[in-house]
Amino acid sequence: MTRLPQLLLLLQLLLLPSAAFLAWTIWRLWFRRDQTLDPRVYTVGVQAFGVGSWLVALVFIYFSQREAIPVIVCLVPLWLWAGYFWGRLMMAIFPRRTQK
């Protein structure tokens, strides 16, 4: 008995929602920013911390456990959202000072 139909079903159940969540996350955090928030949330948080820490993790995983690369690639949306919340936390701790 072939396992191909089971594998295709598994891919449809896991890959399609993951791809949809990734597309929505990139659209929401990269292209449709909340204009009421400080822009540093997106530049420092999402783009610098989120993408930067994901790339560091990807390089670390590449040199230690290459079989885990698909897992880390699937976690891109979670890294971006972590960067978003990190950026919001940093802007709450270090607010922009107003000039007098």
Image (cartoon, grey):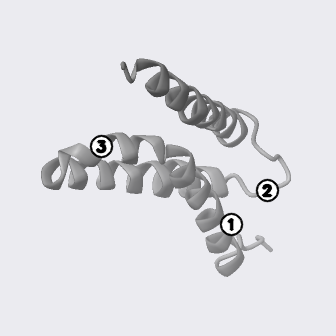
Q: Nearer the viewer, residue 63 or 12?
A: 12
Q: Is residue 75 above or below residue 95?
A: above
Distance between the Cα atoms at labels 1 and 2? Answer: 9 Å
Secondary structure under the numbered disc 2 in the rendered image: loop
Q: Classify the position of the C terminus by image quarter.
A: bottom right
Work out whether mark 3 precedes mark 1 in sequence or the reverse, and give the earlier one: 3
Spot the residue most to the bottom: 93
Label at residue 50: none
Q: Relative to 9, is 85 on the left or the right?
A: right
The 10 Å Cα crowd at callout 1, few under 14, some 14 to 19, many 20 or more, is: many
Residue 75: x, y in percent? 48, 48
Residue 79: x, y in percent? 51, 54
Work out whether mark 1 precedes mark 2 in sequence or the reverse, and give the earlier one: 2
Distance between the Cα atoms at labels 3 and 1? Answer: 29 Å
Q: Nearer the viewer, residue 70 or 60?
A: 70
Type of amino acid at the residue the image marks with label 1: Arg
Task: Examine the image and state in which quarter residue 30 appears.
Answer: top right
Distance between the Cα atoms at labels 2 and 3? Answer: 33 Å
Secondary structure under the numbered disc 3 in the rendered image: helix
Q: Classify the position of the N terminus by image quarter.
A: top left
Q: Which residue is mark 1?
A: 88
Q: Is residue 5 above or below residue 80?
A: above
Q: Which residue is mark 3?
A: 69
Type of amino acid at the residue the image marks with label 3: Ile
| Label 1–label 2 contact, CB within 8 A | yes
Label at residue 37: 2
Residue 88: x, y in percent? 68, 66
Residue 85: x, y in percent? 65, 64
Secondary structure under the numbered disc 1 in the rendered image: helix
